[in-house]
Amino acid sequence: MPKERIDKLLSHQGFGSRKDIKRLLRSAEVLLNGKRIYDPSLGIDPDSDELSVDGEPVTIVKNITLMMNKIAHTVSANKDGEHQTVFDLLAPEYRTPYLQDKLHLVGRLDMDTEGLLLFTTDGALTHRLISPKSHIDKTYFVMLEREFSEQEQADVSRRFEEGIAVGPDDNDPGFTCEPARVRFPSQEEIDAALEKSSVGEVCDRLWEGDAEMLRRPARFAILTIYEGKYHQVKRMFTAAGNKVVFLKRLAMGQLLLDKKLAPGEYRKLSDEELELLS
């Protein structure tokens, strides 16, 4: 692992801004491998070096990975001049100068899409999850504008499994999707997926708040894809003669969205969950 500057690491650990770290190095006993240091630009190897401040060991967190249940109407970006971003929802401890350079999104979700979104400082993890060669599957819960008949469900399943051709979107050209899996969920699965979501806004907008629209299983689908092209899920169902009106990501590979997370909430991944992504 490459060495990191002392000031950046201490800032990451919550000791303040990099200017604060300069003052800390003058006023406190900061030891690197038992030797007092004063230079904020000194490098440290988190795998082998030992650091302490006034006799208290500093545990260096090598990488952070967060799972968020993304809320609708937020942009998957660090900054946006018009809209709230997913980074705006993070606590100050995750928005330090150090983490501003390191913490990034693993892929993105559209502004109106909800569900599983990952933040990490681990570049190797990001590469593994988004590389086309990895074929990491992503599973989405979909609500459609109209119900599919049984025959249409069978046709859609076949066309998705064969690799459906989708048309252009904005400046993105059309393409043929890789084979994907779709199934049509039970009412119990639908209720679970919608429990902590903003689907009520969709009902208000399209059906004047008629909640009975949520009790029609033929209006819903669970889709698993193995790539992540621009607006892919929406374009697939458009090509199948329908329209996505609500979209929520449920899983990436074997990692499932924590059902306890309300929209906009997040938490660190456990070691066991990180293993699921390896």
Image: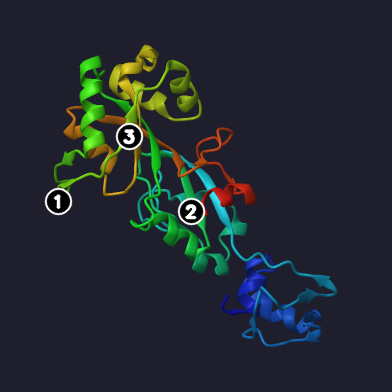
Quarter in which the N terminus is drawn: bottom right
Q: Give above or below for 252 relative to 120.
A: above
> Which badge, 2 or 1, is on the more N-terminal residue?
2
Q: CA distance from mark 3 to mark 1?
A: 23 Å
Residue annotated with mark 3:
181
From the top left corner, tell me how far across and down residue 211 is, in percent.
39, 14
- Quarter of the image where one finds residue 28: bottom right
Label 3 CA crowd tier, 10 Å (few <14, some 14–19, many 20+): some
- Quarter of the image where one finds residue 126: bottom left
Label 2 CA crowd tier, 10 Å (few <14, some 14–19, many 20+): many
Of the pair 77 and 148, the residue shown nearer to us: 148
Q: Amino acid at mark 1?
A: Pro
> What residue is drawn where x is 62% and y is 58%?
93
From the top left corner, tell me how far across and down residue 201 is, in percent.
38, 27
Left or right of residue 169, residue 262 in this image: right
> Which badge, 2 or 3, is on the more N-terminal residue?
2
Residue annotated with mark 1:
173
- In the image, which is nearer the foreground, mark 3 or mark 1? 3
| Numbered disc total | 3
- In the image, which is nearer the foreground, mark 2 or mark 1? 1
Residue annotated with mark 2:
87
Q: Give above or below for 67 relative to 259.
A: below
> Which badge, 3 or 1, is on the more N-terminal residue?
1
> What residue is drawn where x is 79% and y is 87%?
35
